[in-house]
Amino acid sequence: MLVPSPWTTPHPSPPPAYHVGSSPPLFPPHEDLVPSVSSLADIYSASELPHQSARWAALEARFRALYDRQISFVTRTPGRVNLIGEHIDYSWFPVLPMAIPRDVLVAVAIIPAADAAADGRIILSNVQALKYPTRVFNTRDFTDPFFPIPTDKHIDWSAYFLAGLKGALTFSRLCATEATPLPTMRILVDGELPTCAGLSASSAFVCSSLLAVLATITAPVIERSFLVNSAVISERALGVNSGGMDQAASVFAIRDHALLVDFRPLVSAKPVRVLDTVPRLCFILANSLVSVSNRTETGPDRYNIRFVETTIAAEILAREYSVGRLEIRDGFGGTLRGFYDKICERQGWAMGDRESEERAVKDIVARIRKTFSKDRYSLDEVAEMLGLSTEDMMRKYTTRFPIRATHLNLRDRAQHVIEESFRCKCFSSLLASSTTNLRALSATESTPYFDALGELMNASQESCSSMFACSCPEIDNLCRIAQKYGAAGSRITGTGWGGCIISLVRADRVDQVIDGLRKEYYSVQHPEIKDISEVVFQITPSNGSVLTKGTGFQM
Ligand code: NG1
């Protein structure tokens, strides 16, 4: 099913306005600054404060014990879940993530040149010292921003910090030089995000590191969009061809809101409030404990292939339907959004309401299925459709981000992207309408909203599993169990092939869903886990990246 139709089920109020893309970005340039906060209450919600106060106090004590110094400032960046809109950001379609309270902190002491302790070293430690051993760098290693970052098969944890540092030096144009190297720094990292779980731990670490170095070398007046764009490019130094959703979600996030992140014409984020329903709408995260391994290792078999398949599909469709040259994304190739927009423009379709978008989606899916009559094409066949030799095609599309593939599936990948983008628009529109329409309704009257949102999530999961092939049996099983025990909808979140699912659940069913997951998944697959609160938990949307004020910060 493409999309269950929330507007055709009995509806307690008029259809919500369909406003995707029509309003201006949330942050006009002059307001687009990373907040400089003066207390923990500026970052966390009241319920998180007791835990976070203890954690920050421990970080401070550890810092002193390690370095015999006070912290100059801390940067904080949260992880994220994606509610819907999977694997469509790199085709330039909007996505709907939200930040979660778990985050990465980077605590920094800057040691001025006049200080006797200024030894020209950057010492990088982690509170989990056994897992992430301390690394020491010489500030003179970074006088050329093109310094190499080792990205062997097993990437060291410090590479994410170095990617952020490299990004800061490259994009701030305040390159450290032989005469004026970076200052001596002492750094302690504390990450609360599980790694390899699809919660964007690595992007959060890169963003926090980038912000920390920027705050060290410039005034602490840093534009959020600058941070997002630099972080996206920084991660490429790790061989990751990044879509951009994670960095935007983590940096732009606002408490109690999801973000409709768009990438055209510039990256922008529009907040959509999510918690104003009766009964309350809750989100439960459940970790399959199937590791989404490091992208540098698995990219060639997974993410990079999807990137190449969707790009090539767009290029072939543009040729087939003579829409002219597509705008190139990051020097790589055209996008399916580019093709979609060109067709709509040529047909003279005024977009912006649900019916028009649905008509366009159906038309474009029909074109996709006509152009790609089968689901597997050999590389030679793909090259022929592109009008290139196989060698030229491989050079163009697989040099920067390598792939391991003998065949590509252009049809199902492209169809997923187009339909998923529509589901994402419908979901955000419905969610936005809940704040204005649902508050006055009874629990029974609000049921169609929950059902409609849930069905969109389930349809997304079905498509990720069958069309985009980025799910796995454990994730499919988790989704099935969550639904059986009362979740309105469940789906994979993030890159996939493991990691976490996100479920949308009415407040009065949260306990039964968690209990069902415990009984039917964790007790069976992971009987060794006694307390499942680390792997299944409720999440609320959190604030985005911040920088603590240099003096007078209140814990
Ligand atoms: P994660 O789960 O963080 O690896 C990746 C991409 C996103 C997006 C999703 C799929 C990066 C850093 N992250 O997320 O941009 O494409 O997959 O929706 O590239």
Image (spheres, rainbow, N blue to C red):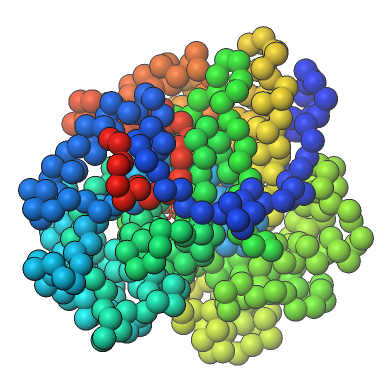
Q: Residue at x 25, y 53 (%)?
A: 72
- Pick the residue in front: 451 or 438: 438
Image location of residue 116, percent across then percent down:
8, 68
- Pick the residue in front: 548 or 198: 548
Q: Is residue 14 above or below residue 349?
A: above
Q: Is residue 329 above or below residue 257?
A: below
Q: Is residue 39 above or below residue 470?
A: above
Q: Image check: 510 left or right of 164? A: right
Which quadrant is home to the C terminus?
top left
Q: Is residue 389 above or below residue 161?
A: below
Image location of residue 384, percent across then percent down:
66, 83
Image location of residue 203, percent across then percent down:
39, 56
Q: Residue at x 56, y 39 (%)?
A: 258
Q: Residue at x 40, y 63 (%)?
A: 219
Image location of residue 199, percent across then percent down:
40, 46
Query: Which of the 4 quarters of the picture holds residue 59?
Result: top left
Q: Residue at x 75, y 78 (%)?
A: 325
- Pick the residue in front: 251 or 308: 251
Does residue 551 appear anywhere in the picture? yes
Numbered marks: total: 0
Q: Image check: 166 left or right of 352? A: left
